[in-house]
């Protein structure tokens, strides 16, 4: 009994002494304990800061250096001198959810969460919430007061400090012109972290970094109508990148640039994807883990798939009845469920749009139809129809009308900004479309921010310097490089409507520099819920039977995805699994031939498999074909032409 009292007294002393001294730093670990986030105070200005380390087999890597935290509301600054009221740690978060599309349908979330309840000198409160996963970190600011008061956020001090020795792949945030900002500037060559952008507008998300065997990708997710989109400020010296809100000139001055909402309120999640291999970035679905779950009661009508599209090969063809009919016929022939009707369809020549819709229905082909999103926020005046999407009552009437005609989806273009008002326009269109059981693709738009989970009828977004530019800017030379950067940057964030697979030269003056096998591989290397294959019908029909068969059967949603090999700007080799099939696609951007050897993932021990390969032929416009029998651990070796590629398909039995 005496021993028990002594032990109890000792424990009480330890408890009291520890309680007398409030902690000055906090640590939170990933479930596998490889990632560590440390939150403490900057000694020079008493602001909160965070840093991230990653434990590898070769030691602890300083992945994100001490980076400032803080946010300034119009009525209150949450910067220096913050008092920590309490901290709450929740370990062992573990649940699953399913997506309708994307790189992996079934997702298991494992995370630990730290919440710091903070108060400034005026007793205004803010919560700082960190969630740490095995493949990254998300954090945000929450204003917990429930008084309903409306405030504007003037500035966010959030930093991402990357080692200055890091390599970086980032694209500039667009300036304003008739069609931008729309994330279509493109990625330049590899640079050092802290390199000044070529434009005063700064850098756009996502931003990819490589340093000391570690990979980091910065972005944001979980944006709803209560906040604007953000990007990275131009001043990024020494590799310190800062959050910046939209510019006042976006949308030609319409809407406020800074976000405002009533309390309680939370910012979007600032997201850092982290891994000791590039595949940890390319394979990650972390952008969805922190997005709101879907609350649609019925999603059975949302059906991703492949679509034909006549615009690339016939600019202005959106109003030519016979041209559109030809592409509908080709979709029916290929077994593709959709065909996209682009701009000007309301002034159809050679027939009526109603007749076209009936014809498509008779062929069992669903139509997507194009709309200009403007309104005052857009100055694209000559691309019609417009003024049907920005006003709620007009939009709902139009959606109801086309739904009754059997239309399956809409492609909405030209948003030109990321202000809170613009974000609300995106989401209102998507939600109203869902009420009418219409799928949505956006073009001339911002990047995905977890919305494919929250609003699964949003089946793809552009936000990429895509295949349509082959016809405008003599893009083929740039595409050789861009194609091997996008799988590790833009496409990590979600479905990307690049409009790929064009074998034909757009014109005698604008020729492909990628091989035909490279172009075929884009059907797999690039993920999109709706995959608009953009080439002319005549070009597709000229391809070998094996190529046509591959395009007939390639899925657009995947059970799982694995990066086999790759490096931004050089190579991307990706395997994707769907049901009992494994598909592999690889592309090179090198100017010389190369040989590539790899093992196929997703195979089982003790079984033998047959892989059918479509590869580069003797020239860039030719294919070669091979069938290989292999056990699980046997390597495949493939020779690639300059800017070459290949695809392979395996049936699991």
Image: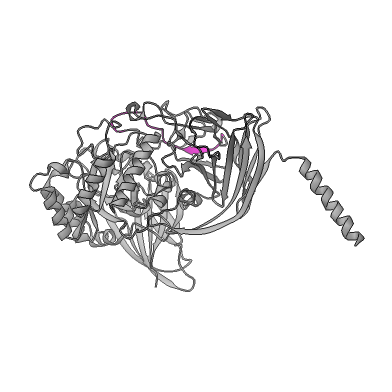
| Above or below 627: residue 217 | above
Residue ranking furthest to the left: 350
Residue 596 highlighted magenta (yes or no): no
Quadrant for the C terminus, please.
Answer: bottom left
Quadrant for the N terminus, please.
Answer: bottom right
Horizontal arrangement in the rendering, residue 155 relative to residue 586 (left or right): right
Asked whether the viewer can see residue 409, the reply is yes
Magenta: main secondary structure equals: loop
Marks counted in the figure total 0
Question: Coloured how?
Answer: one colour
Q: Point out the stretch of residues depicted in magenta.
A: 164-179
Asked whether the viewer can see residue 515, the reply is no
Horizontal arrangement in the rendering, residue 113 relative to residue 493 (left or right): right
Residue 170 highlighted magenta (yes or no): yes
Residue ranking furthest to the right: 2
x and y percentages locating residue 58 in the rendered image: 64, 50
x and y percentages locating residue 461 in the rendered image: 34, 45
């Amino acid at each position: 009994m005496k021993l028990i009292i002594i032990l109890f007294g000792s424990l009480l002393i330890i408890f009291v002494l520890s309680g007398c001294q409030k902690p000055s730093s906090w640590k939170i670990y990933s479930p596998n304990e490889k990632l560590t986030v440390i939150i403490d105070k900057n000694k020079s200005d008493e602001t909160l800061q965070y840093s991230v380390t990653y434990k590898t087999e070769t030691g602890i890597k300083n992945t994100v250096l001490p980076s400032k935290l803080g946010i300034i509301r119009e009525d209150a600054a949450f910067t220096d001198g913050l008092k920590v009221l309490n901290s709450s740690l929740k370990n062992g978060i573990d649940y699953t959810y399913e997506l309708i599309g994307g790189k992996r349908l079934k997702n298991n979330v494992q995370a630990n969460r730290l919440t710091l309840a903070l108060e400034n000198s005026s007793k205004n409160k803010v919560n700082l919430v960190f969630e740490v996963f095995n493949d990254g970190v998300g954090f945000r600011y929450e204003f917990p007061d429930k008084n309903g008061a409306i405030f504007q956020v003037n500035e966010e001090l959030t930093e991402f400090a990357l080692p200055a020795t890091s390599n970086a792949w980032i694209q500039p945030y667009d300036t304003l012109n008739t069609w931008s900002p729309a994330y279509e500037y493109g990625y330049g060559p590899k640079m050092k972290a802290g390199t000044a952008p070529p434009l005063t507008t700064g850098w756009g998300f996502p931003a990819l970094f490589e340093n000391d065997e570690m990979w980091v990708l910065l972005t944001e997710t979980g944006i709803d109508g209560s906040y604007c989109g953000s990007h990275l400020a131009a001043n990024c010296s020494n590799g310190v990148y800062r959050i910046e809100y939209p510019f006042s000139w976006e949308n030609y001055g319409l809407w406020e640039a800074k976000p405002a909402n009533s309390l309680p309120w939370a910012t979007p999640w600032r997201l850092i994807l982290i891994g000791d291999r590039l595949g940890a970035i390319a394979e990650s679905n972390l952008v969805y883990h922190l997005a709101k779950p879907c609350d649609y009661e019925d999603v059975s009508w949302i059906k991703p798939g492949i679509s034909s599209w006549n615009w690339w090969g016939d600019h202005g063809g959106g109003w030519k009845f016979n041209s559109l009919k030809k592409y509908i016929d080709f979709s029916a022939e290929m077994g593709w469920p959709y065909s996209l009707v682009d701009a000007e369809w309301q002034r159809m020549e050679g027939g009526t749009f109603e007749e076209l819709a009936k014809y498509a229905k008779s062929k069992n082909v669903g139509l997507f139809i194009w709309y200009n999103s403007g309104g005052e926020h857009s100055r694209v005046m000559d691309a019609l129809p417009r003024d049907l999407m920005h006003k709620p009552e007009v939009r709902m009437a139009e959606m109801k009308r086309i739904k009754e005609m059997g239309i399956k989806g809409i492609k909405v273009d030209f948003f030109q900004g990321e202000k809170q008002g613009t974000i609300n326009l995106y989401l209102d269109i998507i939600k109203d479309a869902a009420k009418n059981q219409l799928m949505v693709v956006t073009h001339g738009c911002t990047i995905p921010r977890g919305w494919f989970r929250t609003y699964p009828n949003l089946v793809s977004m552009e936000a990429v310097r895509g295949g349509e530019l082959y016809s405008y800017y003599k893009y083929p030379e740039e595409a050789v490089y861009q194609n091997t950067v996008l799988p590790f940057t833009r496409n990590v964030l979600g479905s990307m409507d690049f409009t790929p697979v064009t074998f034909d030269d757009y014109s005698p003056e604008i020729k492909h520099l990628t091989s035909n096998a490279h172009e075929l591989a884009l059907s797999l290397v690039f993920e999109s819920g709706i995959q608009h294959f953009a080439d002319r019908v005549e070009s597709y029909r000229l391809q070998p039977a094996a190529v046509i068969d591959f395009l007939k059967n390639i899925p657009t949603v995947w059970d799982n995805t694995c990066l086999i090999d790759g490096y931004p700007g050089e190579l991307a080799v990706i395997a994707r699994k769907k049901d009992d099939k494994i598909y592999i696609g690889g592309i090179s951007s090198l100017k010389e031939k190369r040989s590539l050897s790899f093992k196929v993932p997703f195979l089982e021990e003790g079984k033998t498999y047959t892989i059918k390969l479509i590869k580069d032929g003797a020239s860039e416009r030719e294919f070669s074909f091979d069938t290989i029998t292999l056990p699980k651990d046997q390597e495949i070796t493939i020779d690639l032409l300059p800017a070459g590629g290949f695809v392979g398909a395996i049936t699991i039995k």
